[in-house]
């Protein structure tokens, strides 16, 4: 099984955004050495928990610091941007790092309604024409002209570049058929709700039409995991992220980033403990073998091609160790 990396540039306690971005670069260099297939930067706005607000810029910097690993976005939230500019961004990236760039397209806002209106200059955010914007960006990348009249007289530079791979992100299955019809890779975020449905992947494969971006259907599933040398260590390191997720899902916009020590002392109610137990599938916790066995079983059931790993232990050394342990478990080639 191929393994890849999803990084949100988390700002853990005691660090700032600059630290988080520096650690994203360190993570990319190390996971390339370990044999990971690709690293994608997420897009988050109006949060003090993540520093990845401009993933295309971080991707460019990471591409310059690495040599083999594919680099991209998971994803670029197309609703906020001109398809013309998005196409030029990714064509430029691909000209600088040919054969290594992934155009990961997100349909979500990547932030709250305040961020949505700010990104739209105070106008009503565009939420009804996302697939039209996706199609226009793909045509520009292929050096074709979109149908919109205001796009017909422009070209997206640079031209004559190696096409990036193009992926559409999803978390509910609603976009599976749309992805297949466009001949794109399908990236499914299991960690959004902890659930998957095989019929979603079957629908994607059945609707797939080969394109300039993808010759055959390809599926990535993204998991949030915490791996330790022992299960006890993994549970200890996972608790801060689990508490933060719980508070966020209950409506707290910027939940606290706790250290593992602080998380142990957090005053969990019986309802909190019940929530954490019922939502264990949001964070796959265990030793490398336990997590590896879980991912292999999931692949056997759902037939995906690649697992993308996101993890947020408190310390950078622990985060790097999660990827090292999984690389050893899956015998990734360095």
Image: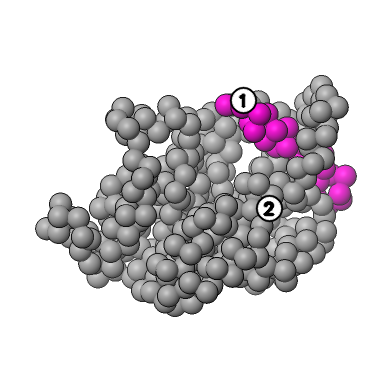
User: Could you tell me if the residues under marks 1 and 2 are in contact, i.e. CB atoms within 8 Å?
Assistant: no
> In which quadrant of the rendered view does residue 10 lie?
top right
Residue 193 spot, x, y in % from top left: 65, 46
Q: How many marks?
A: 2
Give neighbour class at mark 1: few <14, some 14-19, many 20+ (Cα, 10 Å). Answer: few
Local SS, label 2: loop
Disc with the residue nearer the chain's start (1 vs 2): 2
Is 28 drawn above or below residue 21 in the view shown?
below
> In which quadrant of the rendered view does residue 239 lie?
top right
Towards the viewer: 178 or 143? 178
Is 280 drawn above or below residue 12 in the view shown?
below
Residue under label 1 = 252
Whether residue 91 is visible to the viewer of this picture, yes or no, is no
> In which quadrant of the rendered view does residue 222 lie?
bottom right
As drawn, is 79 to the left or to the right of 239? Answer: left
Local SS, label 1: loop
Magenta span covers which residues? 228-253
As drawn, is 60 to the left or to the right of 248? Answer: left
Residue that appears at 83% across and 32% down: 273
Classify the position of the C terminus by image quarter. Answer: bottom right
Residue 132 spot, x, y in % from top left: 32, 54
As drawn, is 278 to the left or to the right of 248? Answer: right
Towards the viewer: 147 or 142? 147
Residue under label 2 = 195
Residue 211 spot, x, y in % from top left: 38, 74
Towards the viewer: 52 or 306? 306
User: Is residue 64 covered in magenta?
Assistant: no
Classify the position of the N terminus by image quarter. Answer: bottom right
């Amino acid at each position: 099984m191929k393994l890849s990396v999803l990084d949100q540039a988390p700002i853990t306690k005691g660090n700032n955004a600059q630290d988080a971005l520096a650690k994203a670069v360190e993570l990319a260099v190390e996971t390339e050495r370990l044999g990971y297939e690709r690293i994608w930067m997420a897009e988050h706005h109006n949060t003090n928990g993540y520093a990845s607000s401009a993933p295309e810029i971080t991707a460019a910097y990471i591409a310059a610091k690495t040599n083999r690993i594919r680099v991209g976005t998971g994803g670029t939230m197309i609703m906020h941007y001109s398809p013309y500019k998005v196409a030029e961004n990714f064509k430029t990236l691909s000209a600088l790092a040919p054969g290594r760039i992934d155009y990961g397209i997100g349909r979500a806002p990547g932030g709250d309604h305040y961020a949505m209106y700010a990104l739209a200059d105070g106008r009503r955010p565009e939420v009804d024409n996302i697939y039209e914007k996706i199609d226009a960006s793909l045509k520009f990348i292929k050096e074709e002209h979109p149908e919109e009249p205001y796009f017909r007289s422009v070209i997206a530079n640079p031209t004559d570049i190696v096409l990036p791979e193009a992926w559409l992100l999803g978390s509910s299955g609603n976009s599976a058929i749309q992805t297949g019809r466009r001949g794109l890779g399908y990236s499914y975020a299991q960690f959004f709700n902890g659930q998957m449905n095989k019929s979603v992947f079957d629908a994607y494969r059945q609707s797939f039409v080969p394109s300039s971006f993808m010759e055959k259907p390809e599926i990535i599933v993204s998991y949030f995991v915490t791996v330790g040398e022992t299960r006890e260590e993994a549970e200890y390191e996972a608790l801060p992220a689990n508490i933060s997720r719980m508070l966020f899902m209950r409506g707290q916009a910027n939940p606290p980033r706790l250290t593992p020590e602080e998380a142990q002392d957090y005053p969990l109610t019986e309802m909190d403990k019940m929530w954490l137990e019922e939502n264990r599938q949001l964070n796959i916790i265990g030793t490398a073998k336990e997590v590896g066995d879980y991912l292999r079983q999931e692949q056997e059931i759902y037939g995906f091609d690649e697992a993308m790993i996101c993890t947020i232990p408190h310390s950078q050394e622990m985060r790097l160790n999660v990827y090292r342990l999984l690389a050893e478990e899956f015998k990734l080639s360095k």
